[in-house]
């Protein structure tokens, strides 16, 4: 894979007519599709600017999750909102938190202890998903799935893109929604989504390659959830 050398010295942010931009040596940063990378707030622009400023000799996109998410939210989200909302709804229909282990008992109990409070929170928001320990899929209540979809549809392009990403990482629209609403931190939701994996690791140990992948995903979630730390300005 080819890597571009760092070609700029100074990274700045500036308020523009339609939002906040990031500039490299005075030139406004653009998306891969050549659209101006203009975001909703100074906070988000600062996160992107920091990623560009932290590049040393070469530009490594894999170390720039906020920039990548902003690119997607600008180039793809505006024309694909219905598709993205539908994706969140589909995940809710087979939500990770709905499917419990029949055995061993200690894992089953841990799932109940750690997942049920999140499901109760979701229920308070009108999302009442069924749970099962059977192998066969269950049909979820349409009203609850519509509630998740409606929540996603009210988000702006940036937050919708983030919710879709978190939903896919967690395998759970409920955990993603709880993170977006700051009921859980991104790291708390990530650990809850890996409860089964963590249980297996406790029993049998962890594969080194799997550990590296999990650590990279966790770091990405932590970086992306910084988007939610401050109110939009």
Image (cartoon, rainbow, N blue to C red):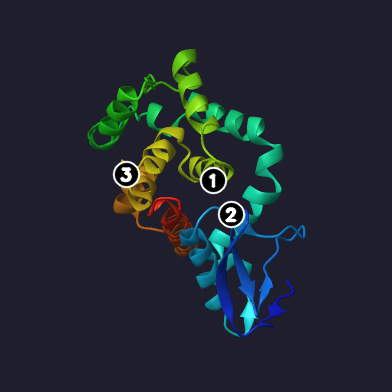
Provide the residue designation for mark 1: 165
For marks 2 and 3, give the CA distance: 21 Å
Report helix, strand or loop for mark 1.
helix
Q: Mark 2 near mark 3, Cβ–Cβ under 8 Å?
A: no
Q: In front here: 95 or 17?
A: 17
Q: Is residue 225 left or right of residue 84?
A: left
The correct choice, above or below, for 229 with respect to 209 in the image is: above
Marks 1 and 3, the one that precedes in the sequence: 1
Which secondary structure lies at badge 3? loop
Rendering coords of residue 77 (x, y %): 65, 42
Give the number of the mark in front: 2 or 1. 2
- When asked about the image quadrant of residue 89, the answer is top right
> Residue visible at 66% across and 32% down?
83
Q: Secondary structure at mark 2?
A: helix
Q: Is residue 226 left or right of 63 when viewed as pictured?
A: left
Res. 6 visible in picture: yes
Give x and y (percent) for residue 37: 65, 60
Residue at mark 2: 69
- CB within 8 Å, label 2 to label 1: yes
Q: In percent of the image, x 55 and y 69: which residue is there?
A: 13
Residue topped by disc 3: 184
Q: Earlier in the sequence, mark 2 or mark 3?
A: 2
Determine the CA span between mark 1 and mark 3: 16 Å
Q: Position of residue 21 (x, y in %)?
A: 60, 63
In x, y percent, where is residue 104? 28, 34
Q: Quadrant of residue 174?
A: top left
């Amino acid at each position: 894979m080819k890597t571009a050398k760092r070609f700029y010295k100074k990274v700045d942010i500036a308020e523009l007519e339609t939002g906040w931009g990031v500039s490299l040596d005075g030139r406004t940063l653009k998306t891969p599709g050549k659209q101006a990378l203009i975001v909703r707030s100074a906070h988000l622009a600062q996160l992107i600017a920091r990623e560009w400023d932290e590049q040393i000799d070469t530009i490594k996109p894999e170390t720039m999750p906020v920039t990548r998410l902003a690119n997607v939210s600008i180039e793809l989200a505006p024309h694909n909102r219905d598709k993205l909302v539908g994706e969140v709804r589909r995940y809710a229909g087979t939500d990770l938190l709905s499917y419990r282990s029949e055995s061993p008992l200690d894992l089953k109990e841990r799932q109940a202890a750690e997942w049920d409070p999140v499901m109760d929170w979701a229920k308070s928001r009108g999302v009442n998903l069924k749970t099962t320990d059977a192998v066969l899929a269950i049909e979820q209540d349409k009203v609850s799935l519509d509630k998740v979809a409606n929540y996603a549809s009210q988000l702006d392009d940036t937050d919708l893109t983030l919710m879709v990403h978190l939903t896919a990482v967690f395998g759970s629209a409920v955990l993603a929604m709880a993170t977006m609403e700051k009921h859980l931190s991104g790291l708390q939701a990530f650990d809850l989504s890996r409860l089964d994996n963590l249980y297996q690791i406790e029993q049998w140990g962890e594969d080194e390659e799997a550990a590296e992948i999990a650590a990279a995903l966790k770091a990405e979630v932590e970086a992306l959830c910084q988007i939610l730390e401050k109110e939009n300005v």
